[in-house]
Amino acid sequence: VALGPLYTVAGYSPVTNVISELAAQGTPGNYIMSAGFVVLGLSLVVDGLRPWRAVHLPFMAFGFFFGGAGLFGHRPIDPELPYTLWVDAVHSALATLAGIALTAGFVGQGFQPSLLRWRVTAFTLAALCVLLPLLMLSFPPYQGLIQRFMYLCVFFWLWEFYPTRARAYPSTRS
């Protein structure tokens, strides 16, 4: 993601353009970001299996849908370039399902009987997963920046807490 502007089409802006546009159909180097989506998605699924807990399921679904979105390219940034409409539609559907699964995972974490700060963090992340995409729609010139902020928050949580510290009470009380 950080190096994307170096290998993609001229005019790509991390402030305006979303991350999926790095893997857009007909975009130079799109296979790099596509592979990133797939590898990260599969990693989340595999990590959720060790140790298996039902509380990991929404995050595993997020990984599955996120990785799947990487297999289907977004429409190109340049509206003049040809692309396959159904591939873009599948990408959008998988990205939406990924967002729903992730939000459900954070809501589930928020309802676990744990420390107050843990529940507040989980509900805050769930709220961000709903509010920030709405901000992206409301402020298209800043959608790339907003999305990157959202992913920074989400991926920090996943890096720090998933799967071993994802709460599933009472069996994993620590």
Image (cartoon, rainbow, N blue to C red):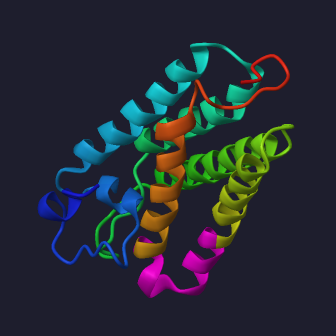
> Residue 134's image quarter?
bottom right
> Residue 18's image quarter?
bottom left
The vertical placement of 153 against 58, above or below, is below
User: Is residue 25 visible to the viewer in this orientation of the structure?
Assistant: no
Rendered-image quadrant of the C terminus? top right
* Residue at screen point 60% across, 39% down: 62
Is residue 161 or residue 6 the one in the foreground? 161
Is 54 inside the magenta-drawn segment?
A: no
Total marks placed? 0
Viewed as shown, does residue 13 lie left or right of 163? left
Question: What range of the chain is rendered magenta?
Answer: 132-144
Is 142 inside the magenta-drawn segment?
A: yes
* Residue at screen point 25% across, 50% down: 30
Viewed as shown, does residue 99 lie left or right of 143? right
User: Is residue 121 visible to the viewer in this orientation of the structure?
Assistant: yes
The vertical placement of 67 against 9, above or below, is above
Q: Position of residue 80 (x, y in %)?
A: 30, 75
Q: Position of residue 17 (x, y in %)?
A: 37, 72
Q: Main secondary structure of the magenta part?
A: helix
Rendered-image quadrant of the N terminus? bottom left
Q: Position of residue 22 (x, y in %)?
A: 30, 58
Is residue 27 or residue 117 the one in the foreground? 117
Viewed as shown, does residue 14 lie left or right of 89? left
* Residue at screen point 51% across, 29% down: 44
Q: Position of residue 49 (x, y in %)?
A: 59, 15
* Residue at screen point 51% across, 19% down: 46
The vertical placement of 60 against 158, above or below, is above
